[in-house]
Image: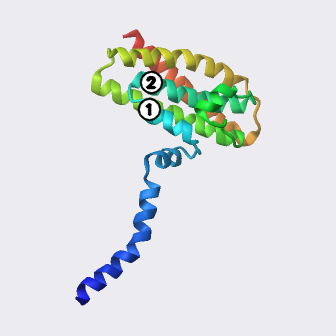
Amino acid sequence: MTVRRSRLRGYRRLLPVFVFGLFLFSPGLALAQQRGDVLNEQEIERIREAQEIDQRTEVFLKLAGRRLNALESRPDQLTRREQWGEPPGGSPKQLLTAYTRLLEELADKLDAVAETKGEKDPKLRKALTRVRHDMESHLTRLERLTLGDDELAAHRAALQMARLLLDGASDALAK
């Protein structure tokens, strides 16, 4: 009986660690923490709903576009707020970093589908077409931004990632 009680005491001490671990690794929270960006509930839900690569690409491009809109101080439309939640906030550096991380995650998703289903997959090609279109627009918008010295590194990283996605999509579509 003493062995069981001592085990129970040991498990009780681990309970807070276990609960914290569950909270830390829940899908929505883990996704937000991985990006270093606080996604709202609606954004997390949109990601969960988008299972196919063309749909998921739309969601990630929308999330990246929302961060660009916030950088440019463009107001969010009320209909979008109902579906996507409050617009993202933060410093220009934080918004640029979040933008870059969203594009990195999108690139990973596109690469994974290309590896498993092949570059000729119709949904992948649809996604790549959308990426190419949006990245052309995003690059123009990013290049027009006026930023301080503190944001230059994050700005360069965002430009580099947008160019990388544009070039990768263009190359894949040319095949």
54, above or below 105, in the image: above
Query: Which label was assigned to residue 147?
Result: none
Q: Amino acid at mark 2?
A: Gln
Provide residue 122's location: percent of width, then percent of height: 35, 14
**Residue 145 spot, x, y in % from top left:** 73, 27
Q: Is residue 54 left or right of residue 139?
A: left
Q: Earlier in the sequence, mark 1 or mark 2?
A: 1
What residue is drawn where x is 34% and y is 75%? 11
Residue at 46 percent of width and 56 percent of height: 24
Q: Is residue 171 above or below residue 48?
A: above
Q: Please count the marks in the image.
A: 2
Residue in the image at 69% along x and 43% along y = 90
> Which quarter shows the C terminus?
top left
Question: Residue 55: which numbered mark, if any?
Answer: 2
In the foreground, 71 or 169 = 71
Is 73 above or below relative to 16? above
* Contact check, label 1 and label 2, Cβ < 8 Å: yes
Residue 77: quarter of image? top right
Q: Quadrant of the N terminus?
A: bottom left
Give the residue at mark 1: 49
Residue 54: which quarter of the image? top left
